[in-house]
Image (spheres, grey):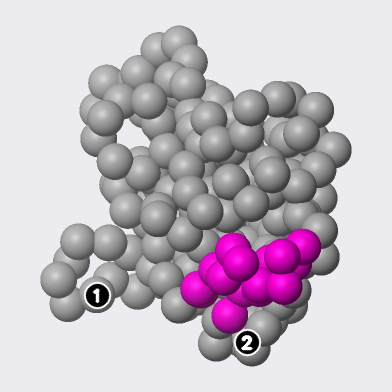
């Protein structure tokens, strides 16, 4: 395959799990979210938080489009959403109109999802307990683990390529060099897999 050169802008989308129902009118000053885990209550949420959750209930959104100001986003909306990480589906896409790369679904009432910077030379791999499966339809691959509070659905081959590289010890730098993807796309896929608990330090003794 021919390598794609340059950067392909990625998009980071947020949505609520399909079972989540948002009651915008609860008690006037409160917001009630009902899910399989029970009820989560936000007291006095800002208009930005209310609008973000309203849009997220409808489907994946770019938070920058749902929240008017950068200050509201960083200081108000993101902290509120971190409290609700067990209700939030995180989706990574590319601005190429071909659909999302992957989505991370919460499976537990405690499901933190934190993107961290990945060292390019750190040797990592899929943990041994991660199951890589392909549904009968063959349309999408799935990564699951009994030790992870998330399920990762790989919507496109690009995301599956990165996951398959992690079947053996590798580094972000090595995967970026080997795959026919823009380096920033490989890096962001790595980041999502790591945040979902699908990446572990490689055991050098194996």
Residue placed at 81% from the left, 50% from the top?
79
Task: Give the x, y percent position of residue 25.
Answer: 61, 67
Left or right, 145 with reference to 203? left
Residue placed at 30% from the left, 25% from the top?
96
Task: Give the x, y percent position of residue 176.
Answer: 53, 30
Secondary structure under the numbered disc 2 in the rendered image: loop
Tag on residue 153?
A: none
> Which stretch did the figure color magenta?
20-34
Which residue extends farthest front?
Answer: 28
Look at the numbered discs 2 and 1 and tell me whether their residues touch, using CB distance below 8 Å: no
Residue 90 showing in the rendered view: no
- Mark with earlier residue (2, 1): 2
Q: State the residue position of label 2.
A: 37
Q: State the residue position of label 1.
A: 135
Which residue extends farthest right?
Answer: 75
Residue 6 showing in the rendered view: yes
Q: Quadrant of the C terminus?
A: bottom right
Left or right, 59 with reference to 31? left
How far apart in space, not on screen, are marks 2 and 1 (Cα)?
Answer: 26 Å
Left or right, 170 with reference to 73? left
Q: How crowded is mark 1: few (under 14 residues within 10 Å), some or many (20 or more)?
A: few
């Amino acid at each position: 395959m021919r390598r794609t050169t340059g950067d392909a802008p990625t998009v980071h989308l947020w949505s609520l799990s399909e079972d989540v129902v948002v009651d915008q009118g609860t008690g006037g000053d409160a917001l009630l979210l009902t899910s399989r885990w029970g009820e989560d209550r936000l007291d006095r949420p800002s208009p930005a938080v209310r609008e973000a959750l309203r849009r997220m209930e409808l489907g994946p959104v770019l938070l920058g489009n749902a929240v008017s100001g950068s200050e509201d986003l960083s200081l108000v909306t993101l902290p509120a959403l971190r409290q609700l990480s067990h209700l939030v589906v995180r989706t990574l896409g590319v601005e190429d109109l071909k659909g999302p790369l992957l989505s991370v679904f919460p499976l537990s009432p405690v499901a933190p999802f934190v993107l961290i910077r990945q060292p390019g030379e750190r040797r990592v791999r899929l943990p041994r307990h991660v199951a890589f499966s392909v549904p009968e339809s063959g349309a999408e691959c799935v990564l699951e683990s009994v030790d992870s509070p998330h399920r990762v659905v790989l919507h496109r081959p690009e995301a599956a390529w990165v996951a398959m590289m992690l079947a053996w010890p590798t580094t972000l730098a090595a995967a970026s060099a080997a795959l026919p993807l823009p380096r920033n796309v490989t890096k962001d896929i790595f980041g999502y897999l790591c945040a979902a608990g699908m990446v572990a330090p490689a055991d050098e003794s194996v």
